[in-house]
Image (spheres, rainbow, N blue to C red):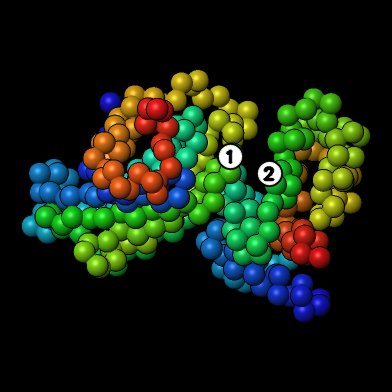
Amino acid sequence: MRWIWIDRFVDFQSGRRASAIKNVTLAEEHLHDHFPGFPIMPECLMIEAMAQTAGILVGEARAFQEKVILAKVKKAVFFHYVCPGDSLRIDAEIETITPEAASTRGTLSRASETIAEIELLFSHVDQNLGGSEFPRQNFVFEDNTFKSLLRSFLAERPTDQNAEHPRSPLEPST
Amino acid sequence: MDATRDKILEQITEVLVDALGVDEDEVLPEATLMEDLGAESIDFLDIVFRLEKAFDIKIEREELFPVETLMNDPALVQDNVLTDEGLALLKEKMGHSDITEFEKDPNVNRLGDLFTVNAVVNFVETRLR
């Protein structure tokens, strides 16, 4: 069981860009403490929303064969508070992807207002072992939790979009 | 220093300031990326990606910072010291760095001394030629 911090994908272009939605609710207990009487989404959880959106994008680009690990927050700038009831849109795009790593950039926004700009670096950890050992199984994507988010998007995608989107490895070949 | 090299250093300074969160005046030509500027292993990937973008070049893995190639072969490193074969390979791969000092005590723990700002400038300058 993995902790999912985004609600759904609204766009997914294999190897290029992805967009997801995160709805913020006062039912999230940490908001009661952050801060009492003034609930705002912690910035680190905005980074997490981007890390999951961009991380799945990077993972899918290599057919979920790599263990994709967030290695570095290259940039994170926040412009506004995020409050319960807000619907956040996360737009991520791959800047560079190589056998050993990927860099992504993107924004979090609320309606047309930019909330944050976040750039991340992901490691394909098996390609950067430097003598260390990791479990052989893919502990990032193996339990299918993250993949299920993408499956939901693919299942709901209007058929007229299929032509412009390359087939995902999650989709059965016909 | 000619104008082109000056311009390259300026762009590399910008890359290192962004990648490592250091101040511009810390990025001296002789500064080492690890010891002086605090770079960790993942930062090298970040730096390579940023250089590719800044200069519109393609940098192959281990081209700029050839560490794994050397470390993972017992013919090249014995008891943490580069063998003659290892040194020869290092010279071949790191033409962008001055290894005269390193050669006197080729301990792998001193490899980081070779990764200087100057070495990065030399590398980019050669690639742009």
Residue A99, visible in the rendered structure: yes
Report the front residue among A91 and B74: A91
Report the front residue among A35 and A118: A118
Tell me, for residue B11, which label it has, or none: none
Write the residue at 10% across / 44% down. A27
Mark 1 packing: few (<14 Cα in 10 Å), some, or many (20+)? some
Report the front residue among A18 and B3: A18
Q: Which residue type carries mark 2?
A: Arg
Furthest toward the bottom, the residue is: B3
Above or below residue B51? Residue B70 is above
C-alpha distance separating marks 2 and 1: 9 Å
Q: Are marks 2 and 1 in contact (CB under 8 Å)?
A: yes
Q: Is residue A116 left or right of residue A125?
A: left
The image quarter containing residue B88 is top right
Q: Quadrant of the N terminus of chain A?
A: top left
Report the front residue among A137 and A168: A168
Query: Measured from the top left, where is residue B82 in percent x and y?
Result: 83, 35
Query: Measured from the top left, where is residue A129 in percent x and y?
Result: 59, 31
What chain letter is assigned to the residue under label 1? Answer: A
Secondary element under disc 1, as helix, strand or loop, is loop
Q: Which residue type carries mark 1?
A: Glu
Write the residue at 74% across / 47% down. B63
Query: Which residue is the site of mark 2?
Result: B61
